[in-house]
Amino acid sequence: MDYPKLRYVEAFPVEVQKQKLICLRDPQNLSGKMVFVSSEALFIISLFNGKHSILDIQEKFMKQFGNLIFRDEIERLINQLDEALMLDSERYRSFKKNLELEFKNSMVRESSHAGLSYPLEASELKSWLDGYFREVEQSHPVKSDFGKIRGIISPHIDFRRGGRSYALAYRELINKCNADVFIIFGTSHYADIENPFILTRKNFKTPLGEAQTDTEVVEKLASSCSWDTFEGEIFHRQEHSIEFQIVFLQYLFREKKNFKIVPILCNSFIKMIQNGNSPKEDNRVSAFLSAIKGIIAGFGNKALIIAGADMAHVGLKFGDLEPVTESTLRWIKQRDLMSLSFTEQINAEGFFKSIEEEKDKRKICGLSPIYALLSTIEAERGKILDYDQALEPDTGSVVSFASVGFYS
């Protein structure tokens, strides 16, 4: 592997046995491994772009640090990353091919985060969720009365940090929701394809049971598009943004009614932001969302839309040069709430513009699912139900998130 090429990995500072290191983590967690490296090793890894040979890397290391690094040291680092499936290598491509084949042949999308982000046992998971709703009843005893619920924006941050916000969103569905089809737009964090939306026909399994996918709706959507809506289906396998919503839907409704889901991963709109083009100018986006809107109209009040979406990702963990400060947090909140005001107006273009005008400085990972919801929902108004920021002091970073209800 003379020209090593790194896949997309997360890098953030950690302290291990009083030693400051950089943790490298594959967001898709294909190998289950993390790699801890020094800052000097990180410099070497930063050159793994498929264009630098090992000799090139040795020369650049000498220029940067003034001393020679031996070839076998670089090769050990290459092998360590390759074993963790962090390199775009023959090992990774073979693993991915087998993984895709296995996923393609399965009728069910198994839970990828049970036992990691939330309990594996149904009874313990139910106890967790009971606690979030009890907390909300104590902290927010007055329930909203804004009209008939037509959709929600819910976080997709981990339950421990976002439990209250999840519960405030899903509380809106209790005794107010007649829907038996839930169209779920989720952020696709890691898909490396151009198509804006990714479908799947698979049912979704969690510790609370198996949620049935409405394959009839999925096929209608697929047939309405001129592009392959199943390209990149493998990214449903590890993505949590839809899985977390299904857990809450099962908690609320699995013993009350049969319901179906329409799981839709939404890819990044970053190129549109960079070019200053609205998503509506993309024929693929407009055709897909138009088809969704028609399907929703046909269901009437029997369909409800959910966007599993977080807001800002700022700080060292997310590629910024400086850790967040109190001033940064205030700025993020002010900008987040300004963007969210457009959700209350059900103004998709206003929401997009509020992010595009700053070139996505906040790195809003929920842009595409929220835009999709705002473009398709049959509602008269929205209401912000919650807003919060999850600060990570160890990495000098923050993730913000919100809950919004939509009513008619």
Image (cartoon, rainbow, N blue to C red):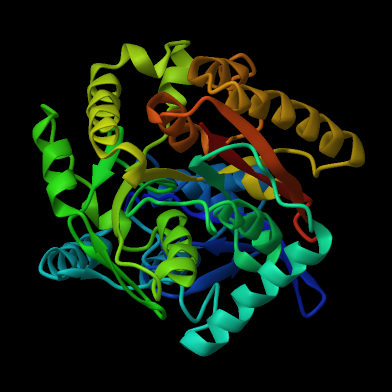
For residue 246, above or below residue 357: below
Q: What x and y, as percent, mark residue 61?
A: 58, 48
- Name the residue furthest right: 326
As rendered, which of 4 and 144 lies closer to the eye? 144
Q: What x and y, as percent, mark residue 188?
A: 40, 46
Q: Can residue 361 be seen in this view?
A: no
- Name which residue lies at 76% across and 33% down: 332
- Name which residue lies at 62% across and 18% down: 354
> Image quadrant for the N terminus?
bottom left
Left or right, 40 with respect to 55, comes to right
Total of numbered circles in the picture?
0
As rendered, which of 332 and 128 lies closer to the eye? 128
- Name which residue lies at 18% across and 45% down: 217
For residue 130, above or below residue 60: below
Left or right, 127 with respect to 215, comes to right
- Name which residue lies at 63% across and 60% down: 167
For residue 391, above or below residue 146: below
Left or right, 407 with respect to 296, comes to right
Q: What x and y, as percent, mark residue 363?
A: 60, 35
Q: Quadrant of residue 391?
A: bottom right
Q: Quadrant of residue 31?
A: bottom left
Left or right, 246 with respect to 237, comes to right
Q: Can residue 108 be seen in this view?
A: yes
Q: What x and y, as percent, mark residue 214?
A: 20, 54
As rendered, which of 55 and 376 lies closer to the eye? 376
As rendered, which of 105 and 339 lies closer to the eye? 339
